[in-house]
Image (spheres, grey):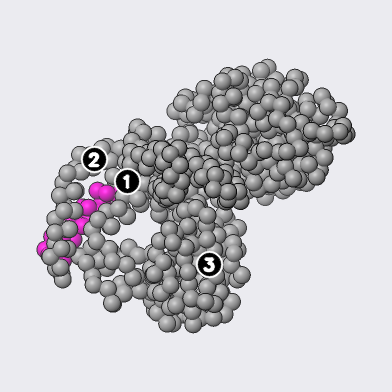
C-alpha cells in the first residue's frame, strides 16, 4: 500500500522491534527514527529503515525526521510501545480513503496489551483514555504548516500540532475498530513524572494558544497547589503501597486520590515551567548534572578518556541543556586526542550549532592551512598576490542580518572588489537585497567551509557577528552593528538599512491587501509578539484589535497561531513584510525580529523593550539608528494596552490611498 509508518524510538529497543514486527505484514514503508538511544536500534533484516539522530532531540524532532524521509504522502505515526492489531492499519487506511479528505487526522483506539499485568495506575488510566493513539495523517498538509514543533521536548507536541492545524481546517476523528495495544507497565511514580513533564510543556503550549489551558494564568491557584506538595506526596506513597500489594481492583476512593495526584503534579509542572521561562524565579539547576560534567572534565585532564567520554555522553541525555554544548566540545577534544578526526569534527559542529558563540569549538574547526588569522575570525590568504575577493560571513538572527547591510556595503567600498555574503537559507533571500555582489547559502551555521573558500579564491574572510565573537563583543560594549564594523575595519556612513521590496514582492503585497479589503495607510501592522512569556502578550494585542478603528495585520512565521480579531499574514518573505509594514499606518513589535525589517521602512513604529535583556548590549532602536529614524516609540513589555491604544488614536492620521 502507498503508506509510510513512522515510529519514533528512544531507549525502547526491545519494544520497537515488536512494534515493527506487528506492522511488517502490511507491505507499507516502515521508518524507525532512533532518537540517539544508548544502544542503537537494530530491527530484523528488511523489516524497516532505521534513521538515527546523532544526539537525543526529542519525539517531535524524531517525527519530523520521519515525515521528511517518508516516500508516501499518507503517513501513520505510532509510538514504539504500541503493538498494532493485525487489521489496525488496513482499517485506518480504508476509512481514510473512504473519507477522501486530506485535512482529516484519523486516530486508532488504544487499550492495554492483554498480556500485561495491570497496576492500579493502569486500571485508573483505562477509564480516562489518556493514551497516545496511532494517527494517520496527510504528510504534505502537516509539513506545509511546519510539522511538529521541536521546542516541545517533554510532551504535548501532538496537542500543539492539532491546535495549530485546526486553524487551517484539520478535522480529528477516531476509529474505534482500529485497535492498538499499549505494551508498557505504568506505576504511580511513572504517572507522576509524566504529568509533571506535561505541565512543563503546558506553559509553552499556552504561550502559543493563550485560550488553551487557562490554569497557566491562575497564579493564585498555582501557589495554593504548591502548598499542598506534602499531601500530594503522601497520596503517591499510599498508591505505591497499594500497588505493591498487587491489588486487582481500585479500592474505594482511589479514583479521587488519582485525580488529586494528576492535578497536583500537572500544576506543579506548570509552576516549574513558569520559573524556567522567567515567569516566577529561576529554578535551581540539577546539581547532579553539573557534578557529572565536572567529574568528566577532571577525568579528561587526567587522561582517563574512555570514562570521561562515557560521562559526557551521559550529560547529553540529561535535561539540563546548558551543559550540552560544553559536553559536545569536550567529546570533540577527546575524539581528536584519540585520532578520530571526523568524529571530533562532528562534535565540534554540534557544539557550535547549540552555541554559536563557542569560540574554542570554532577554532578547533577553523584551522586553515592557506589562510592566516590576522585577528579573531578575520582571515587573509597566504601566498602569491591574487585579485581581491571578500567573503562576509553572517548568520545570526534577523537583527544581525539587517545590521549587516551597511557593513557589507562599507566592505565593498573599502576593497573596491567583489564581496560575497555567506549566510543560512532562511536569510539568503533577504541578504540578496543588500549591496553584496553575490549571496551563498549553507545550512552549516558557524562552520567556515575552507576548502570551498579557497577554491573560490577569496582573499579576505570576515566572520564579525557578535555570537561568533562573544567575549570580544561583550568586552567592547558596542552594539552589534558597530562591533561588526569594527571587526571588518570599516567606517559606517549609515546605521539604517533601506530595503527595496522588488516588483514580485510588491505584487504579492498588493494582492494581500486586495484579498482582505485593506487600503494603504489604513491598517496597523504587528509582529507576532507574545509567543513567549517575555513580550507584550497576545491578550493585549487582542484588546488593541477590538478597540481601535483599524484592521490589525499580524505578521509572523507560517506555523504561528492566529490572534483572534486580527488578519493573519504568516510565512511571507521579508520583502513582502517590508512592503506591508511600509504601507501600514503604524507598526508594533518586540525589540527583535521583524522589528528590524520595520526600521527599513518609512512607517512610524512602536517597539516593546525587554527590561531584562540577555546582555547589556541591547540598546534602544532610536539609539542604534541615531537620528536616521526618529518616529520610533519605545515602551516596556509591561506597558498596558490602554497606553498603546491612546498613542495610536492620538498619532495615527489616515493616509490618502496611493
The number of discs equals 3
Mark 3 Cα-neighbour bin, 10 Å: few <14, some 14–19, many ≥20: some
Mark 1 Cα-neighbour bin, 10 Å: few <14, some 14–19, many ≥20: many
Instruction: Judge whether 448 appears above or below 155 on screen.
Output: above
234 within the magenta span: no
The quadrant in which residue 18 appears is bottom left
Q: Residues in magenta?
A: 250-266
Per the picture, the main secondary structure of the magenta-coloured stretch is helix
Q: Residue at x 37, y 42 (%)?
A: 292
Give the residue at the far top of this rendering. 627
Q: Position of residue 561 (x, y in %)?
A: 51, 48
Element at label 2: helix
As rendered, which of 398 and 29 lies closer to the eye? 29
Q: Residue at x 52, y 28 (%)?
A: 608
Mark 2 sits on what residue? Answer: 226
Label placed on residue 269: 1
Instruction: Judge whether 190 appears above or below 599 on screen.
Output: below
Amino acid at each position: 500500500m502507498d503508506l509510510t509508518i513512522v515510529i519514533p524510538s528512544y531507549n525502547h529497543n526491545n519494544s520497537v522491534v515488536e512494534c515493527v514486527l506487528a506492522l511488517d505484514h502490511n507491505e507499507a514503508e516502515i521508518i524507525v527514527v532512533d532518537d540517539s538511544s544508548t544502544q542503537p536500534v537494530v530491527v530484523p533484516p528488511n523489516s524497516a529503515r532505521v534513521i538515527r539522530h546523532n544526539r537525543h532531540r526529542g519525539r517531535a524532532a524524531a517525527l519530523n525526521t520521519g515525515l521528511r524521509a517518508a516516500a508516501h504522502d499518507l503517513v501513520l505515526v505510532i509510538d514504539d510501545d504500541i503493538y498494532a492489531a493485525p487489521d489496525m492499519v488496513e482499517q485506518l487506511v480504508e476509512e481514510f480513503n473512504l473519507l477522501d479528505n486530506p485535512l482529516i487526522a484519523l486516530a486508532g483506539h488504544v487499550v492495554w496489551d492483554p498480556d500485561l499485568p495491570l497496576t492500579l495506575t493502569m486500571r485508573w488510566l483505562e477509564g480516562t483514555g489518556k493514551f497516545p493513539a496511532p494517527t494517520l495523517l496527510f504528510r504534505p498538509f502537516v509539513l506545509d504548516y511546519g510539522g511538529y514543533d521541536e521546542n516541545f521536548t517533554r510532551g504535548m507536541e501532538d496537542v500543539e500540532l492539532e491546535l495549530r492545524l485546526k486553524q487551517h481546517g484539520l478535522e480529528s476523528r477516531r476509529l474505534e475498530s482500529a485497535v492498538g495495544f499499549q505494551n508498557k507497565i505504568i506505576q504511580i511514580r511513572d504517572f507522576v513524572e509524566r504529568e509533571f513533564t506535561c505541565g512543563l510543556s503546558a506553559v509553552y503550549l499556552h504561550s502559543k494558544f493563550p485560550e488553551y489551558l487557562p490554569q497557566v494564568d491562575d497564579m493564585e491557584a498555582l501557589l495554593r497547589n504548591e502548598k499542598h506538595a506534602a499531601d500530594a506526596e503522601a497520596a503517591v506513597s499510599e498508591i505505591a503501597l497499594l500497588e505493591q500489594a498487587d491489588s486487582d481492583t481500585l479500592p474505594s476512593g482511589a479514583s479521587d486520590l488519582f485525580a488529586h495526584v494528576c492535578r497536583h503534579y500537572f500544576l506543579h509542572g506548570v509552576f516549574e515551567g513558569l520559573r524556567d521561562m522567567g515567569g516566577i524565579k529561576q529554578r535551581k539547576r540539577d546539581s547532579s548534572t553539573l557534578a557529572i560534567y565536572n567529574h568528566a572534565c577532571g577525568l579528561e585532564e587526567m587522561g582517563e578518556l574512555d570514562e570521561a567520554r562515557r560521562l559526557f555522553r551521559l550529560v547529553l541525555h540529561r535535561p539540563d541543556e546548558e551543559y550540552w554544548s560544553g559536553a559536545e566540545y569536550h567529546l570533540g577534544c577527546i575524539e581528536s586526542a584519540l585520532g578520530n578526526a571526523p568524529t571530533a569534527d562532528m562534535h565540534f559542529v554540534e557544539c557550535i550549532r547549540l552555541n554559536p558563540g563557542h569560540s574554542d569549538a570554532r577554532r578547533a574547526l577553523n584551522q586553515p592551512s592557506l589562510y592566516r588569522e590576522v585577528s579573531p575570525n578575520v582571515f587573509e590568504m597566504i601566498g602569491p598576490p591574487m585579485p581581491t575577493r571578500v567573503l562576509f560571513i553572517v548568520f545570526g538572527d534577523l537583527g544581525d542580518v539587517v545590521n549587516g547591510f551597511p557593513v557589507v556595503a562599507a566592505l565593498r567600498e573599502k576593497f573596491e572588489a567583489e564581496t560575497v555574503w555567506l549566510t543560512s537559507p532562511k536569510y539568503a533571500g533577504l541578504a540578496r537585497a543588500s549591496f553584496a555582489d553575490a549571496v551563498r547559502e549553507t545550512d552549516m551555521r558557524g562552520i567556515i567551509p575552507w576548502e570551498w573558500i579557497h577554491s573560490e579564491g577569496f582573499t579576505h574572510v570576515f566572520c564579525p557577528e557578535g555570537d561568533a565573537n562573544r567575549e570580544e563583543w561583550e568586552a567592547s560594549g558596542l552594539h552589534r552593528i558597530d562591533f561588526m564594523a569594527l571587526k571588518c575595519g570599516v567606517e559606517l556612513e549609515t546605521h539604517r538599512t533601506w530595503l527595496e521590496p522588488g516588483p514580485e514582492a510588491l505584487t504579492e503585497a498588493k494582492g494581500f491587501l486586495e484579498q482582505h479589503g485593506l487600503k494603504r495607510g489604513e491598517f496597523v501592522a504587528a509582529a507576532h509578539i507574545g509567543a513567549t512569556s517575555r513580550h507584550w502578550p497576545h491578550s493585549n494585542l487582542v484588546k488593541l484589535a477590538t478597540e481601535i478603528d483599524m484592521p490589525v495585520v499580524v505578521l509572523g512565521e507560517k506555523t504561528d497561531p492566529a490572534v483572534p480579531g486580527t488578519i493573519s499574514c504568516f510565512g511571507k518573505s521579508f520583502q513582502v513584510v517590508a512592503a506591508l509594514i511600509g504601507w501600514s499606518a503604524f507598526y508594533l513589535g518586540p525589540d527583535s525580529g521583524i522589528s528590524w525589517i520595520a526600521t527599513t521602512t518609512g512607517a512610524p513604529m512602536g517597539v516593546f523593550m525587554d527590561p531584562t535583556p540577555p546582555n547589556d548590549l541591547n540598546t534602544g532602536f532610536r539609539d542604534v539608528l541615531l537620528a536616521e529614524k526618529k518616529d520610533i516609540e519605545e515602551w516596556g513589555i509591561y506597558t498596558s494596552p490602554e497606553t498603546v491604544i491612546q498613542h495610536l488614536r492620538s498619532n495615527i492620521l489616515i493616509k490618502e490611498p496611493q
